[in-house]
Image: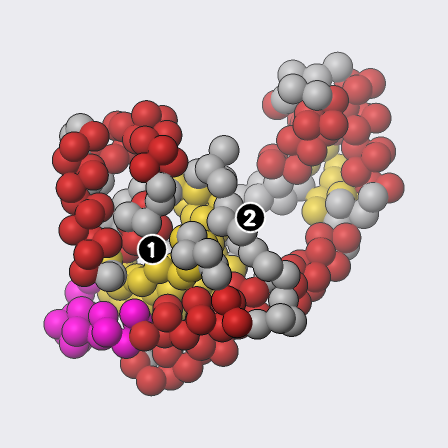
């Protein structure tokens, strides 16, 4: 790993559950010499990616807010998909999400939560594994075979635990069925208590970018009506994909390769 990679890796320590880190804590976590860690922190602070707080500790810096604004403007999944996902939530009465493929994970880029949104609903900037649950499964179902094989080789145990298949052939058959029906439905597969219904998003070359999904509680009395909304979710996904393919006002987005 290069020194630049090691420096940027420090940012991975910061999260909702651990938003404040001291230089000594970071040096210990990443097994860095204190002098090296301080040098990295100085560079990240000067770039605005980290900010100093009391007692020599650090938090995420204001530059991240500026970058998030740029992302919202330039990311076609967000800029084109946000009004569509908001309209889908209004029409159906259920919470709705936009997510993208990011390395070998799924990241939420937009959430529209209703008053009865299930606890622990995926929110903007949150990542989750590319295995289990409708949001992830519909993306998996449209990956090229070589990328899917890569996911299988690295996450075989997690795939089996999610009942997607104990071997390559079983996984391939399960995802083929999902791909043919055009949507994925899940009941608490990734997070207990949350039901999901998702359809895929594509770029102009037909490569999968992410998914649009509805979410509700697995104990909702409207669960049968929720499942019946698959055509509406697929229609919304097609609208976003068409907008991405036709728009000249946003960055042309390639499929995000799995790392």
The residue positioned farthest toward the bottom in the image shown? 91
| Residue 140 vs residue 180, the one in the foreground | 180
- Left or right of residue 225: residue 200: right
Residue placed at 50% from the left, 67% from the top?
245
Marker disc for residue 76: none
- Left or right of residue 88: residue 83: right
Dot 1 falls on a residue whose secondary structure is helix
| Residue 25 vs residue 165, the one in the foreground | 165
Residue placed at 28% from the left, 76% from the top?
232
Rendering quarter of residue 194? bottom left
Q: Nearer the viewer, mark 1 or mark 2?
A: 1
- Pointer 2 residue: 16
Is residue 73 shown above or below 137?
Answer: below
Q: Position of residue 246 (x, y in %)?
A: 52, 72
Rendering quarter of residue 152? top left
Residue bounds of the magenta highlight:
218-234
Q: Position of residue 259 (x, y in %)?
A: 50, 33
Residue placed at 23% from the left, 74% from the top?
231
- Pointer 1 residue: 135
Is residue 59 shown above or below 32?
Answer: below
- Left or right of residue 78: residue 22: right
Q: Are marks 1 and 2 in contact (CB under 8 Å)?
A: no
In magenta segment, residue 229: yes
């Amino acid at each position: 790993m290069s020194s630049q990679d090691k420096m940027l890796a420090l940012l991975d320590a910061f999260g909702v559950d651990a938003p404040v880190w001291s230089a000594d804590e970071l040096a210990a976590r990443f097994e860095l010499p204190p002098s090296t860690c301080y040098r990295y922190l100085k560079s990240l602070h000067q770039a605005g990616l980290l900010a100093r707080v009391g007692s020599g500790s650090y938090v995420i810096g204001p530059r991240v807010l500026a970058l998030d604004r740029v992302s919202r403007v330039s990311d076609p999944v967000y800029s084109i998909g946000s009004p569509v996902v908001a309209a889908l939530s209004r029409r159906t009465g259920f919470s709705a999400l936009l997510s993208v493929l990011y390395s070998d994970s799924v990241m939420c880029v937009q959430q529209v939560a209703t008053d009865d949104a299930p606890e622990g609903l995926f929110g903007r900037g949150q990542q989750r594994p590319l295995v289990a649950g409708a949001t992830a499964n519909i993306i998996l179902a449209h990956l090229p075979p070589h990328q899917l094989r890569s996911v299988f080789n690295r996450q075989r145990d997690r795939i089996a635990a999610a009942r997607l298949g104990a071997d390559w052939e079983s996984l391939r058959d399960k995802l083929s069925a999902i791909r043919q029906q055009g949507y994925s439905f899940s009941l608490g597969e990734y997070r207990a208590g949350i039901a999901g219904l998702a359809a895929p998003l594509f770029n102009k070359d037909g490569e999968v970018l992410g998914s649009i999904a509805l979410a509700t509680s697995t104990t909702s009395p409207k669960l049968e009506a929720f499942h019946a909304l698959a055509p509406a979710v697929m229609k919304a996904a097609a609208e976003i994909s068409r907008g991405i393919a036709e728009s000249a006002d946003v960055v042309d987005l390639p499929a995000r390769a799995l790392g």
